[in-house]
Image (tube, rainbow, N blue to C red):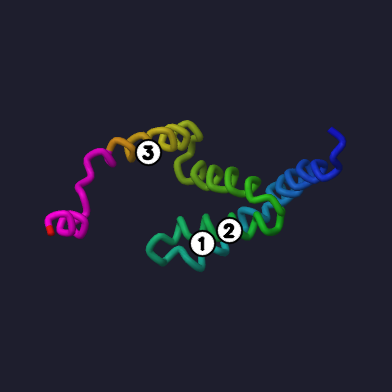
Amino acid sequence: MTDYQLSAIPLFIFMAAMLERAGLIEELFDVVYKLLGGLRGGLASATIISSTILAAMVGVIGAAAGPLPFGIAFDLVGSYTDVLLSLAVLPLAAAVLVLFLREPAALRQAAED
């Protein structure tokens, strides 16, 4: 592979690693969480906004979409095992619960008319 554009990928990952090592990511999340923490859904909003800001700084959205939420979840729970287990179980539970959903009332009324 001789495509020079692919050489940017390790540099973006290096930039994210340097920001994390400098403590900038944690400080960024703390600031955003202090602003939004009192609101309903403040933790989720702070995670999304700080991930977006980090992605804009680093340049790769994938570099921010994984490590930051995992780091925050580790800080909250204290174990990656619990986080990974919940990420495996929640989609499965959601898929099973979808099977038990009722048809929306508006569609039911339209079908009856």
C-alpha distance separating marks 2 and 1: 9 Å
Look at label 1 and name its amino acid. Tyr
Dot 3: within a 10 Å radius of its alpha carbon, few (fewer than 14), some, or many (20 or more) residues?
Answer: few
Residue 84, image x, y percentages: 47, 34
Q: Which mark is residue 90?
A: 3
* Mark 2 or 3, closer to the camera: 3
Per the image, the residue denoted by label 1 is 33
Per the image, the residue denoted by label 2 is 50
Q: Main secondary structure of the magenta part?
A: helix
Residue 71, image x, y percentages: 56, 44
Residue 94, image x, y percentages: 33, 40
Q: Is residue 31 left or right of residue 112?
A: right
Look at label 2 and name its amino acid. Ser
Q: Is residue 13 above or below residue 82?
A: below
Q: Which residues are magenta?
A: 97-112
Label 2 or label 3, whichever comes before in sequence order: 2
